[in-house]
Amino acid sequence: VSSLTRPQKPPAVRDDPGDARPAAPPWALFWLVSSLIAVPGRLPDWRAALFDLLGVTPVSVDAGSGSGVLRLVNVVDLVPPVLLVSAVAAVLAAPIRGWIVRRTYRLTPATQRSLAEIVAFAHMIAPEVAVYGNTRRSDVRAFVYPAGYRRTALAVFGGLVILWHDDRAAAEAVIRHELAHRDRADTLLLGIVSPLEAVLRRWGWILLAFGIVPTLVAWVAETTDFFRQVGAAGAEHKASQFLTLILPGLLWLLLAIAARLLAAITLPVAASWSAELAADHGATEWAGAAALTHALETRRSDSRTRWLFGSITHPPAKLRQALARAGTVPQALAAVSVYPVAWLLLLLWVMTDAAAMDAGRQAGLSAIVSDERAGVAAWAHNDWPAWVAALAMTLAWPALARPWHAAVTSGSTARRAISDSATNKEK
Amino acid sequence: MSEEIEAWAVRLAETVAPKEAVLAPDIVDAFVAGGEDRADLFRTSGAVAAGFDTNGVLAVFPFVLSAAMAAGPAIEAFLSSGVTSVPGMVKDVIELWDRYRHRTVEEAKEIPLGSEPPYQALDRVFSVIEAELGKAGIEPDRRELLTYRIVRHLLDDVDDTREFLDAAAKAPGR
């Protein structure tokens, strides 16, 4: 429907900045802090994986020629520390990330005539936010990015201008969603040019390069070793051995590697999902479900593979649309609970990893059950302090939301106040 | 960038992609500038982690300018082929459009256009623009309509079209 034919409602404006209460706790920061606290307990495992990867750990005498390449599988075990380092780097490098974003997307201060209405609307909601633009690009609509440790900037593109003139409410929902990220300080860890998101979104490549390929290469090397020893006469024996022993073992190993990798990314991905759903909640609250649903529609239908291996840090658009249609209460509940629920998913991966490793070793059922019990006990033992903290944070969030919002936006508001005061003095 | 070209672009956008008319000055400016500015118009970033990804280039107008530029030599050939009046040219365009619209492409090709250079050149203008829009992935029905509107606008506004073509040709390509 054209903006000319659709009656335009005046935009809803937050009179009191304190009204911009984030719907869910900042689970991404919670994940970072709780993971950093847990580092000392995890260090021995990570050190062992690193030493094995670098070849410091000696290979056993009877290991085949493929054992060298299998060392690469240790990279999967090192994904948790890599995620932590990338998260810390995302926070520390926030101002540099802002510079990289402006350079990559060729952003300039949004002074173009075509952006005037959009900038006015954004400043009506968040007067202190700097708005940059690139109207030449219509493949992007908008995003927020860190402009410093406590400052966030909004980038708007030609895609948003088109939407603005096609469906004003949907365009407003996009801006409100992005500014809701700023209300939660999400850009510090997540978002555009975030090293943490870059690693998370490449989990499929990590699995392929450091899980599937080394395992297959090791199997080929092992098969070659076997033929060297027994010659062509052993081919028939090898074929039956392949089907009954090697292939299942290979598949169990791949399953264990995949489960280990998924266990590493589950919590930060859940934190990112929570951030998106909370921002959707903010947009729906002010712009309406229909507006957000339209804004989430894309030109082409998203393929599941493309989402799984490229956009896993964002919930699927269809889920976000369904939650928007369900209302703001289910949206808020989903935003709050997705991170705690991810702990259960984490347990599933831990159990899958243990069971697959046991099955690969052809362990008996009693050994598998025993290992599963030990795995669940370790999971509960390692994580219970974080659970208690998460529960306390969830319960206290209604009271904490407003001070948190004030704290994360006070930097830019204070700067704005100083600037306004200086301007008034000049007058 | 001359104001005439910007105004020409706005008029063209209002005809072929009204929702993009407000962006037309920025788009034509970038197109004429060439290089990275022009490349931005056709860039597809894929998923932008933190943004509302449109999953491809949303604007049609850059492809319209690209089609107009590709048809430049054919337009020049048409204009220098002895056609004397703009209304006459537009009439020819409408006539040719009707032939395409009511018949299949094969049938339309069998219609004797006449051996005179204007008709051959006009046919070429149509073909080039429609082919360029096809490369942009615009669906056939919409492509036909856009082609007609673009050709009509380019020929209605000959002087400014020539100015745009001259300016765009001087810029580094995309």
Image (cartoon, coloured by chain):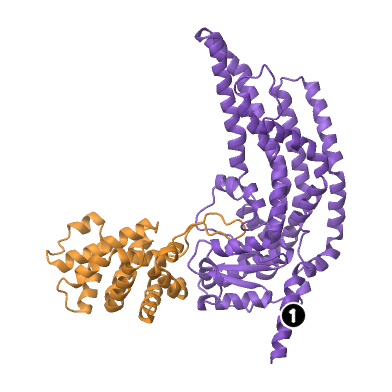
In the rendered image, which residue does mark 1 sit on? A417
Image point (56%, 18%), residue name: A223
Q: Where is residue B166? Give x, y as percent.
A: 30, 72
Question: Would residue A426 appear left or right of A230 to someone viewing this image?
Answer: right
Chain in purple? A
- Circle 1: residue type: Ala
As drawn, A57 above or below B146: above
Label 1 secondary element: helix
- Of A188 and A103, the residue lying toward us: A103
Tell me, yes or no, if residue A256 can be seen here.
yes
The furthest residue to the left:
B115
Residue A412: quadrant of the picture? bottom right
Indicate the quadrant containing the C terminus of chain A: top left, top right, bottom left or bottom right. bottom right
The furthest residue to the bottom:
A427
Pinpoint the chain carrying mark 1: A
Q: Where is residue A426? Give x, y as percent.
A: 69, 90
Tell me, yes or no, if residue A315 can be seen here.
no
- Across the whole image, how many numbered discs are drawn on residues? 1
As drawn, A271 above or below A127: above
- Of A357 and A307, the residue lying toward us: A357
Q: Where is residue A141? Give x, y as percent.
A: 55, 64
Chain in orange? B
Question: Would residue A45 appear left or right of A102 to someone viewing this image?
Answer: right
Within 10 Å of disc 1 (Cα), the crowding (few <14, some 14-19, many 20+) is: few
Image point (83%, 43%), residue name: A383
The furthest residue to the front:
A56
Residue B170: quadrant of the picture? bottom left
